[in-house]
Image (tube, rainbow, N blue to C red):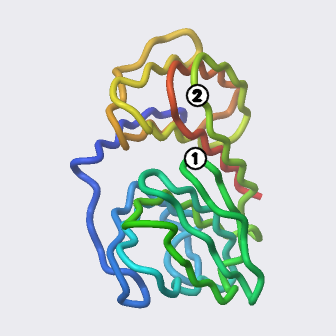
Amino acid sequence: MRQLQWLRAKDYPRMPWKNGGGFTEEITRDAGDGLDGFGWRLSIADIEASGGFSSFAGYQRVITVLQGDGMRLTVDGEHSRSLLPFDAYAFRGESQVSCALLGKAIRDFNLIYAPARYRARLQWFNGDSRLFSAASTVLVFSAQAALQVSIDGQMQPALERYDCLQLTGNDQLAEVDLLGRCCVIELTHI
């Protein structure tokens, strides 16, 4: 059954990183039976100093800087490009990963998912955009105040900065219209 849920940034639970090096605000997750208790998870993290990332064996990760000067990752000994705001970067969860901040503290956005169980697509938009999705779960994450979202021609309540709209049980082609800066994540169970 198709359902819409509005997730408000002020309500996100805050929890310590798996490696104890910082804190994450969990936006939402699939309550699957994964090794770490989920099939996929969306979160926001504050990185205040350069250092190592937690390992998530069996998962794929996609990270995006939301605020700050950016960072450069070293993934299994290979250096990434400089990751600036709204530039997504993917890597395997079991990789050895460390980050070097390009300036002061940053805030980032993370999708972690089990590729053996889900197909995932993550895209950033800015401006007036339209997409069509047959994914079973569609998430719209707002990176601004008062993001306008319409689903199948029906205007939804505005999303404030870091709020998320979650469409689950999608069994048809959903038309999603967006006005502003946001990220759309499409997840389909394999």
Q: Position of residue 57 (x, y in %)?
A: 65, 86
Give the residue displayed 57% in from the left and 21% down from the top.
127
- Residue named by callout 1: 86
Which kind of residue does numbered mark 2 sit on? Answer: Asn
The residues bearing labels 2 and 1 have C-alpha atoms spaced at a distance of: 10 Å
Which kind of residue does numbered mark 1 sit on? Answer: Phe
Q: Nearer the viewer, residue 62 or 11?
A: 62
Give the residue displayed 56% in from the left and 56% down from the top.
64
Q: Position of residue 21 (x, y in %)?
A: 37, 86
Give the residue displayed 73% in from the left and 34% down from the top.
134
Give the answer, above or below, for where 73 lies relative to 9.
Answer: below
- Horizontal arrangement in the rendering, residue 170 relative to residue 159 (left or right): right
Give the residue displayed 52% in from the left and 87% down from the top.
52
Mark number, residue 139: none
Label 2 or label 1, whichever comes before in sequence order = 1
Question: In the rendered image, which quarter contains the N terminus?
Answer: top right
Label 1's element? Answer: loop
Q: Nearer the viewer, residue 64 or 12?
A: 64
Mark 1 is surrounded, within 10 Å at the Cα level, by few (under 14), some (14 to 19) or many (20 or more) other residues, namely: many
Contact? badges 2 and 1 (CB < 8 Å): yes
Find the residue positioned furthest to the left. Answer: 10
Give the answer, above or below, for where 181 lies relative to 168.
Answer: above
Q: Position of residue 189 (x, y in %)?
A: 71, 55
- Horizontal arrangement in the rendering, residue 169 relative to residue 69 (left or right): right
- Residue named by callout 2: 126
Label 2's element? Answer: loop
Find the residue positioned furthest to the front. Answer: 103
Q: Position of residue 4 (x, y in %)?
A: 44, 32
- Horizontal arrangement in the rendering, residue 157 relative to residue 137 (left or right): left
Q: Nearer the viewer, residue 187 or 100?
A: 100
